[in-house]
Image (cartoon, grey):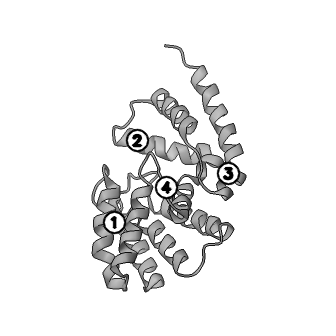
């Protein structure tokens, strides 16, 4: 496994190839999730080979956006199968990484510690003070791709999503859940201001 070489290759691919109207799912998102996963992995005592596999999954989790917006996780799984053998990843390692990519599909489901970490890292911002500005990036992207019609639909979507979402790792439950609850209350207040 040549992780550092793969990291450089993938970050360059994302920088050069992602559409400019991915206001949320741009390179900046992958870098944010990478930092969050690194922090959570420290807390959850994930090191060595498992850490490199986790971080490979993080680097590739949105690579499917290079080719498609919808079903990008499935496309990411395909791209991982093409890219990873060239960086000396084994068949079993590739299969694990493909599973990590698919775990980030909404609604998230995780079956082991690495999957829990990538899921929580991907949605780390929900429980931070950056919730509104980062959420605004996703709002702009969803408008651009016709996923929502307006701000009202966006905020109702956020209330429903935040209400049903739960973090998996002890790190996220300890350091993100309370702020996420506050952010939910904030959006609920915004929704209450709407009149039909």
For the residue carrying disc 3, how many other residues have a C-alpha within 10 Å: few (<14), some (14-19), or many (20+)?
some
Disc nearer the start of the sequence (1/3):
1
- Earlier residue among tags 3 and 4: 4
Q: Is residue 30 left or right of residue 186?
A: left
Helix, strand or loop at disc 4? loop
> Label 4 belongs to which residue?
110
Give the residue displayed 37% in from the left and 64% down from the top: 63
Front label number (3 vs 4):
4
SS for dot 1: helix
**Which residue has dot 2 on it?**
142
The quadrant of the picture occupied by the N terminus is bottom left
Place of residue 136 in the rendered image (x, y in percent of width and height, measured from the top left): 53, 43
**Quadrant of res 26:** bottom left
Residue that numbered label 3 is attached to = 173
Looking at the image, tell me whether mark 4 or mark 1 is earlier in sequence order. 1
- The reply to whether residue 168 is in sight is yes
Judged by depth in the image, the label closer to the viewer, 2 or 3, is 3
Residue 81 spot, x, y in % from top left: 29, 72
Please name the residue shown 40% across and 63% down the image: 99
Q: CA distance from mark 3 to mark 4?
A: 15 Å
Question: Mark 2 or mark 1, which is nearer the start of the sequence?
Answer: 1
Gap between marks 4 and 1 measured at Cα: 29 Å
Asked which secondary structure carries label 2, the reply is helix
Q: Relative to 121, is 82 above or below?
A: below
Instruction: Please state which of residues 167 and 195 is positioned toward the viewer in this rendering.
Output: 167
* Residue in view at x 32 percent, y 64 percent: 77
How many other residues sit within 10 Å of disc 1, few (<14), some (14-19) or many (≥20)?
some
């Amino acid at each position: 496994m040549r992780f550092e070489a793969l990291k450089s290759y993938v970050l360059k691919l994302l920088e050069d190839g992602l559409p400019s109207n991915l206001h949320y799912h741009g390179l900046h998102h992958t870098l944010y999730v990478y930092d969050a996963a690194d922090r959570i992995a420290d807390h959850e005592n994930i090191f060595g080979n498992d850490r490199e596999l986790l971080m490979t999954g993080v680097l590739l989790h949105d690579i499917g956006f290079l080719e498609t917006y919808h079903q990008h996780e499935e496309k990411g799984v395909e791209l991982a199968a093409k890219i990873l053998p060239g960086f000396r990843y084994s068949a079993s390692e590739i299969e694990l990484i493909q599973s990590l990519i698919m775990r980030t599909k909404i609604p998230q489901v995780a079956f082991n510690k690495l999957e829990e970490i990538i899921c929580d890292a991907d949605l780390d911002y929900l429980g931070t003070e950056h919730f509104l500005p980062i959420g605004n990036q996703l709002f702009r992207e969803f408008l651009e791709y016709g996923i929502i019609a307006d701000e009202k639909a966006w905020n109702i979507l956020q209330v429903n999503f935040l209400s049903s979402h739960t973090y998996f790792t002890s790190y996220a439950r300890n350091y993100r859940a309370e702020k996420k609850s506050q952010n939910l209350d904030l959006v609920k207040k915004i929704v209450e201001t709407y009149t039909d």
